[in-house]
Amino acid sequence: MAPSRETLIQSLSSAVFTPVKGEHPNPTDSGYLLCRKARQLLGVPENRIVDTSDALSHAYDGRPIVFLDDFVGSGDQFLTTWTRDMNGRSFQGAHSITGFTAIYITLVTTELGLNAIRSNAPQVAVCAAHVLDKKSTVFGIDAEPEVIKNIESILTKYSARLTPKEDYMTATTQYRTFGYKKVGLMFGFEHSIPDATLPIFWSPGTNNWEPLIERV
């Protein structure tokens, strides 16, 4: 069970903040950007913003941990961070021992990702500014069936020309057509585009194909 609101508020005074890392951790993961914003805009002291390995030690000490990121798509990225084995230790393992307060703050989450975290890591309190439901995807467009059919035909046609840089995006035609885990989002930040957004907007491609928005 996730902690109560009162517990969350009390925990912030002694919490450490850490980025959520991708399935394949990279220094450019968006969680680092959010940590910087927490320091610049919210005044979080720099000594309370720590890397994942240091946060894990705090978790085993029973200290509250606040995970930061900009976006939750499928929930895979956070769940990987939660369960990742780091020399025989993990946040999930730490929670089973100390019951530390775990808070995940994100700017935007999909219902899919939110439900995945609630199901697989119910101990974590997810705090999101915006929750995107089906209406925010290509599958939620309010139009005549024939229009929807035409949209999907266009996406399928041009997905064959797309060459996303991410290996996992080329694993299935459905990912190239509708984005990671076939979420079908029509959404992006100024600083980046989620891989759950329709690749036709952001993926490079063959025959001089240029994406409308580059995913960086």
Image (cartoon, rainbow, N blue to C red):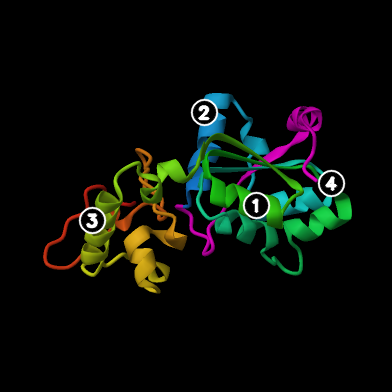
Asked whether residue 20 is drawn in magenta, I would say yes
Asked whether residue 202 is drawn in magenta, I would say no
Q: Which callout, 4 or 3, points to the residue nearer the camera?
A: 3
Residue ID for mark 3: 150
Residue ID for mark 4: 62
Horizontally, residue 170 falls left or right of residue 96, namely left
Residue ID for mark 1: 117
Q: Which callout, 4 or 2, points to the residue nearer the camera?
A: 4
Q: Secondary structure at mark 3?
A: helix
Q: Are marks 4 and 2 in contact (CB under 8 Å)?
A: no
> What is the spatial separation of the Cα atoms under label 3 and label 2, in whole angstroms?
46 Å
Above or below, 6 relative to 155: above
Mark 1 or 4 closer to N-term? 4
166 or 175: nearer the eye? 175
Residue ID for mark 2: 40
Mark 1 or 3 closer to N-term? 1
Q: Which callout, 2 or 1, points to the residue nearer the camera?
A: 1
Q: Secondary structure at mark 2?
A: helix
Horizontally, residue 113 falls left or right of residue 92, namely left
Report the amino acid beneath label 3: Asn
The image shows residue 32 at horizontal and vertical percentages of 52, 45
Q: Are marks 1 and 3 in contact (CB under 8 Å)?
A: no
Above or below, 5 relative to 90: above
The image shows residue 53 at horizontal and vertical percentages of 68, 56
The image shows residue 134 at horizontal and vertical percentages of 46, 45
Above or below, 54 relative to 90: above
Mark 4 or 2 closer to N-term? 2
User: Which portion, as a residue range, is magenta?
Assistant: 1-28
Mark 2 or 1 closer to N-term? 2
Q: Secondary structure at mark 4?
A: loop
Report the amino acid beneath label 4: Gly
Q: Which of the 4 quarters of the picture holds residue 21?
A: bottom right
